[in-house]
Each structure stands twice: as structure tokens, then as C-alpha cells.
Amino acid sequence: MITLRKYQEEISQKAHKILLSKGLVYLSMEVRTGKTLTALNVCKLYHTGWDNFKVLIVTKKKAIKDIEQQCKDFNVKATVINYESVNKVDTNNIDVLILDEAHSIGAYPKPTNRFKDIKAILSKNNRYTRVIYLSGTPSPESYSQLFHQFKVSDEFSPFKDFVNFYKWSKTFVNETTKRVANGFNATDYSDANKTKIDEILKPYFISYTQEEAGFKQQVNEEVLSVKMKPITYQLTKQLVKDEVVEGKENVILADTAVKKQSKLHQLFSGTVKFEDGSTKTIDYSKAEFIKKKFEGKKIAIFYIFKQEFELLKEIFPKFTLEPTEFNTSNDLVFLGQIRSVREGLNLSSADCLIMYNIDFSAISYLQGKDRMTAKDRTKENKVYWIFAEDGIEDKIYKTVINKKDYTLSYFKRDYENRKPSAKQDNKGVRKQGLLFD
């Protein structure tokens, strides 16, 4: 049986009162402070005297096993399902709905399918179903991300009088115009009025930091640069200059800013996806650097692209995709795709976390780097970012650390007028014999 920490008990008591009076409560607790256990205790407090009490927890797929174990250890009966599978379980007569990583339903201005699925559950239960939101980053980029999170409940939402985001934005957002791809103008809804929104949502929120919880280890980040092979720089310069590299059988096409952004992102970490959909590893420099630099260390590596996974498997054949297996083993490397593992996983047994590549998403940055954090951790909480020398990664990093996504506008700023430092042609690329043989 799990024993709650004092602050978890206190927070759950406060949350229980809010849930009773408001119908919704948002536990904005930083990663590793125990949001899930706190929410489970709120359920225990809430269901006293009730029969056939039903709790549904919606989370990320990778976190299901861990949450199911917490429910078992804490003696709470609950159905745990991932967001993509909510239609596969009985969602009738739900008493409490727990939305883990709730910010994932906060996209705007248009609602996502994830939002629609959750709203459908509450629409048929809304007379009594209470909602507990869990997230360490409720609005990582903009307060506009809060509208759809609260809009899922038409019964209890403080925004229930607003038909949609567009109606809501007229009251709560300073709408501006921005230039997007292909020279078109679009409305920018990101400048939400924080003060006005806080006045309404403050009664629903309970915030708690790692510092308040007594965490002594803070994340210590370090950027390490790797000189890639000549083929990488030849290909990237060619794409920036001519927007295409043609081989005997394969073509790398970057005829739009979106494609160019993606291809450079791939190439600077050693892989590429061709125009026909096939993929190939062209440069092992980063992975070989990691193997040599961190020999003897227990490491977890986060990657972006599928071909990067294939690359890493070659260099680290003794690997696992399961956090539990990793935490109980001394000779396995953990490999995880950043968007799948950035939330809800505990990799606190690792000596350090290695970021093989960096995602464009600020959420991936903010949450991914905290996967080793734990209150009782005694090791240094070290995260290493492995960037190609003169690559795109450093530019992405400088954007996401400021809680901004590395969008196309940032990419164009960095590369639109950039000229290659030396002339390259397709013959020079072909001579390498790596891509087009």
C-alpha cells in the first residue's frame, strides 16, 4: 500500500472541495511530484458512500502500465485507457474522469479529434461526471490552449456559454494577423489575455512545484556538438541552394519550406527519407559519438524519426523500449521516440538522458528533459543534447527553451536567405557512394 506524502494529502483535500463545488479541478503539478496518486486520493475522498463507483483515466499509451500499477497499489479501481482508444471501453455512468497530460487536448483554434472524443464521453454523462485535469504544463505556449481543455464539459465549464473558440477569442484574445506559408495571411490567436483568463480559472487550479515538494536535483543541460561526415554537409548545402538532390535511383526533394525544414532536420542527425518514401541512414557520427562518450553509463536515448531508431538499434543492439525493464536492468539502453515518451514515464534509474535529436515542439522540450527527475534521486540530473556542428538543432533549441515551437516562420528566418558556404554539386554527393549506389 502506498503512503502519500504530506503535500499530496493536503492537495487532494483541497482538490476534493473544488471538485464538489465546481465539478472540475486542475492539478497543475510539476513532473514527478505525484499528480496521479494525488488524483487517485481525490477519487477516494469523493466516492465515500457510493456504490458502483466508476473512474476512467485517459493517458498516453506508454503510461498505462505504470498508472494501472499505481491504481492497484493504492487500492483504487479504475479503467485506464489511452486517448486514441477511448471508444473501446464502456464510458457510461462515469463518476470521475481523470485526464492525464490534459494539455494534449488544448489545440486551437479548431478542436482536435481527441477533444471531440473526450467531449462525447462527458456529453452522455454530464449531469454528474466530475473531471480531474493533470498536467505540469497546462498552457506551455499560450493561454488559448486552456479553452478546449475546459470546454469538454458543457455541464461545469466556465466557458460553456461560448459556442466555440472563435466566439471565445473575441473576449479573451488579442487577435492579430501573421504571414504564413505561400505568402497567405492568417489570424494569430496566441495572444490570450492572461489576466482576464486567470480571474475565471483561478478557482479551478492547484499548482505545485518540484521545489515546493522538496526536490533537490534540478535538470542540468549540456549541449555537445558533433562534426558530421562530409556527405551530411554536402547534402544539406545542396538542398538549401537548389532544393533538390537527384541520384541514380533516389531523390531528396525540398521544393517547399516545409519539406526543406523536415529534410534538414533529418539529415543533420544522419538519416533521410526519399521522395519515394524509402529511408536510409547516411551518417552514424552522432550515435558513434554517444557510444564512445557514455561508455559504462546507464543511458536513455530519445530520438525523433523512425530511421533514427533503426540507426540506434545498430549501434546499441542491447536496448529496451519498456521503462520498467530499463529501470530493473543494468546493461540495457532505453530507446524512446520523444513524442511517445515525453510524458508520464519514469526513467529515474538512468545515469543520464541523451537527446539524439530535438523536436520542434516546446512541450517535448519542457517535459522530455524531466523524465529522470525523482524526489529521492541522488544522482546528478543530467541531460545531454547531441547536435551536429553548424546544424539545425541549435536553432531549434534556442527557440524551444523560450517555450515556443520551432515553426516555419522561425525556420525561414534561419534558412530562407542562407547561402551555402561552398559550392557543391550532385557529382560531389554521388562520389561519396552512400546515397545513390
Image (cartoon, helix red, strand yellow):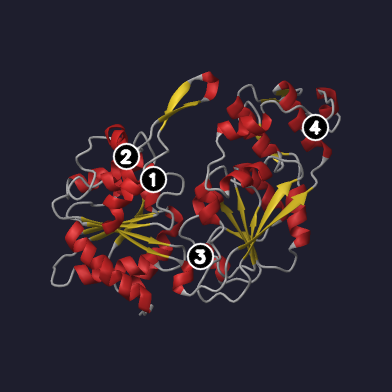
- Residue 25 visible within the image: no
Separation of marks 2 and 1 at Cα, in angstroms = 9 Å
Quadrant of the rendered image containing residue 381:
bottom right
Q: Which residue in the structure is indicated by mark 4?
A: 234
Check disc 4: other Cα within 10 Å, few if <14, some if 14-19, many if 20+.
some
- Asked whether disc 2 touches disc 3, contact meaning CB atoms under 8 Å apart, the reply is no
Q: Which mark is drawn over residue 143?
A: 1
Eye-nearest disc, 2 or 3: 2
- The Cα–Cα distance between marks 3 and 4, rounded to whole angstroms, is 40 Å
In percent of width and height, residue 49 lies at 13, 72
- Considering only order in the chain, which callout, 4 or 1, is on the residue closer to the N terminus? 1
Alpha carbon distance from label 2 to label 3: 37 Å
Q: How far is mark 3 from mark 1, CA to CA?
A: 28 Å
Viewport quadrant of the C terminus? top right
For the residues labelled 2 and 1, say whether their Cβ atoms are less than 8 Å apart: yes
Q: Secondary structure at mark 3?
A: loop
Q: Position of residue 204 (x, y in %)?
A: 27, 57
Q: Earlier in the sequence, mark 2 or mark 1?
A: 1
Give the SS element for disc 4: helix
Q: Amino acid at mark 4?
A: Gln
| Label 3 environment density (alpha carbons within 10 Å; few <14, some 14–19, many ≥20) | many
Q: Name the residue type under label 1.
A: Tyr
Q: Which residue is mark 3?
A: 346
Q: Position of residue 200 (x, y in %)?
A: 27, 50
Tag 2's secondary structure? Answer: helix
Neighbour class for label 1 at 10 Å: few (<14), some, many (≥20)?
many
Disc 3 or 1, which lies upstream in sequence? 1
